[in-house]
Each structure stands twice: as C-alpha cells, then as structure tokens.
Amino acid sequence: MEFAEKVAALSSKVQKQREMTQTEEAAKNAFVMPFIATVLGYDVFDPREVVPEFTADIGVKKGEKVDYAIMRDNEVQMLVECKKANGELRVEHASQLFRYFSVTNARIAVLTNGVEYQFYTDLEAPNLMDSRPFMVLDLGDVDESLLPELRKLTKASFDLNSVVSAAEKLKYIGAIKRTLTEQFQEPDEAWVKLLAGRVYDGTFTRRAREQFTPLVREATSAFLDDQVNVRLKKALETTRPQPGEGAVSSEDVADEDLERGTGIETTLEELEGYQVVKAIACSEVKPERITHRDSKSYFAVLLDDNNRKPIARLHFNGKSRKYLGTFDADKNETRHLLGSMDEIYLHADEIRAAVRNYLG
C-alpha cells in the first residue's frame, strides 16, 4: 500500500471503532500500535525498534514509564505517550514526556489518544520539550497537507533534521489554522470586537457584542463561500471555450443536457486538478486543445474534446482517497493515489506521453 493509503485505512478504522474504544489500553492496541507499525513502519514486536513501557530513572522519579520509545541505531528517537481514545489531550497529560525528553536523545515526542496525534520537539529551548505541538494529525479528519512531513518520521524515510527544520513553520501555521477554524465556528469576544471595531464607531458595549457576534459568524461564513465561488468562477472561465475556438455539436449539447439531469457536480478540486494537468499538457499542444468532461464516476481531461483521446482522469469522488488515471499507448489506464494535488506533477511524463501518442 502507498503511504497515503495506509493513513486512510487507519483513519477509516478509527472512525468506525473510536466509540467502542473507551480505555487507554484499548486505544493502544486498536490505534496506536497500528499507527506505529503500519503508518510509521516500525516493528512493534522488535525491541530494537519499539520498546513498550520504556523506563529511565529521573532524579527522584523512579520506575516512571513512557508508553513507547521508538529506536534507531540503539538510540531513542521518538517517545510516545498514550491516553484513552475519547479523552481530550492537553499538555498537562505529557508530564512523563517532558521529563524523558530532557534525559534521552529523543527530539520528537508524541502525545496521543489514538485518534489525535500531537507532535512536539524542542524549538523553544534545546533538550526541553516545547509546550505546544508543531504538528497535529487528526485521524478522524486527516489533513493531507501534513502527510509529507509525517512520512519523514517513518522508518523507510526517516529525516529528523528536515522535520525539525520545518517544525517552527508547521507549528505556527497549524496553530493559526486551528485558531481561525475556531473563530469561524464560534467567534470569541476579542475576535468580534476586532472586526466590529473596523465597521462600528460606537462603544463596544455588551449590547454591541450581542449584536455583532451572530453578524461576525454569518459574515465569516459568507466570506468563505464567496472565496470558493470566486475560485470556481475563475476556473470555469479558464476552461470555457472562447468564441471561434470550436463548434459545439448537437451530440455535445445532448451529452451536456444528459449530465445536468443525472446529478453530476463538478467540484473545485476537480477543476484545480484539471488546471494542473492542463499546465503539464500545454508543453505539447496549445492550451485551447485541452478540454474536460465530467461524469458520475470520473472527471476526464481530453485532447480536442474527444472521448477517444483521454489524457488523464481524475477520480476524486471518494471520501478520503483521490486518484489520477494516466494512459499508455494502448489507452490502458493506470491509477495513481494522490496525497495532494501537487503529486499530479509526479506523473507529468505519462501525461505528456499520452498527448504525444495522439499527435502521432
């Protein structure tokens, strides 16, 4: 399985079983050990790679344990502390991690309940675990933009220096995104006061706060919708044939009317993927020759708007996994799992080759 598939498979398991996983031990067995084994790729039954109930005497703290220590070259690289699956994670739960971080060679500490994984390092002071995580992975709702950084912690691709160097940026971007999400969903008084102060000249009294809180919530929601609509409109304008660029046949019109009646919905992600494929294919032909057609099962990118000349297919209708379909000289399709939209560029050669095949 590809890395993104492994994460998606564990995410699916977490979503199905989290309500039945009520204890810390259950979370370890059902979620944390599979995360270490299948996602990170370490052998949980080999003490040279994973040491459960890791112990290191620290001052007056004797016999205190951390749930797992992940080893490389006989040195501790990561420490993992687990809590019960449905419990809220707070930094107060990480007392063992704080102590162990300073007396081992570990540069990465993970606090988890099996569903959410908080990754810490020592950005603020050397050998002292930070008070805030630099990355938060939620298997209940995976942010696929984090997968490239998570991959760097796997046994096969371990790259600690790269992780630590990117940690500060990840830490603040992640914190800002989470803060914005919270404020858009339930704005607090400071956020309401900040925005109201830009449009309201009066004193920010209790009555003003009560008046503006629902307005801020509604305005931020409308703002997000507007941004999506602007991007969608731009994408549609880019792909719409201009006058004189080619006639539309009665069959095409019939096909379009049929699609409208079958509930087909072209998504923003599909249009973004189309723009990436088009940018790649334009090295071989003029941009206006690259077109698209949507269907219930896939989004097709075509040469000359001809179904017999497929350049690529975007299989984006799945809930968690997205695939790019490319074609060989015999028009056999191969699907490639995408961890992000940028990974389409990894298949640029196949996309260009498909166009050249139709050009003879």
Image (cartoon, grey):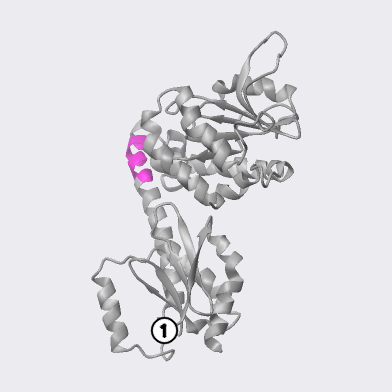
**x then y, percent, for residue 10:** 47, 42
**In magenta segment, residue 147:** no
Residue 8: x and y in percent read: 47, 47
Residue 97 vertical placement versus 359 (above, below): above
Residue at image position (45%, 42%) is 11
Q: Can residue 108 be seen in this view?
A: yes
Please name the residue shown 60% across and 44% down the image.
150
- In screen coordinates, is 154 left or right of 300? right
Q: Three-letter amino acid code at disc 1?
A: Asn
Q: Is residue 12 above or below residue 309?
A: above
Indicate the position of residue 1 as horizontal and vertical percent values: 53, 51
Q: Please tell me which residue is depicted at 53% across the width and 40% down the height of the picture.
A: 137
Drawn side of residue 253 relative to residue 190, left or right: left
Instruction: Please state which of residues 136 and 336 is positioned toward the viewer in this rendering.
Output: 336
Residue appearing at x 43%, y 22% in the figure: 23
Q: Which residue lies furthest to the left in this view?
A: 261
Q: Which residue is identified by label 1?
A: 306
Q: In this view, does 245 lie above or below 271?
A: below
Give the quadrant of the C terminus.
bottom right
**Total numbered circles:** 1
Q: What stretch is highlighted in magenta?
A: 208-217
Quick one: label 1, few (<14), some, or many (20+) residues within 10 Å? some
Q: Main secondary structure of the magenta part?
A: helix
Residue 61: % across, % down: 67, 10
Q: What element carries label 1?
A: loop
- Relative to 114, 254 lies left or right: left
Q: Is residue 183 visible?
A: no
Nearest the eye: 65 or 47: 47
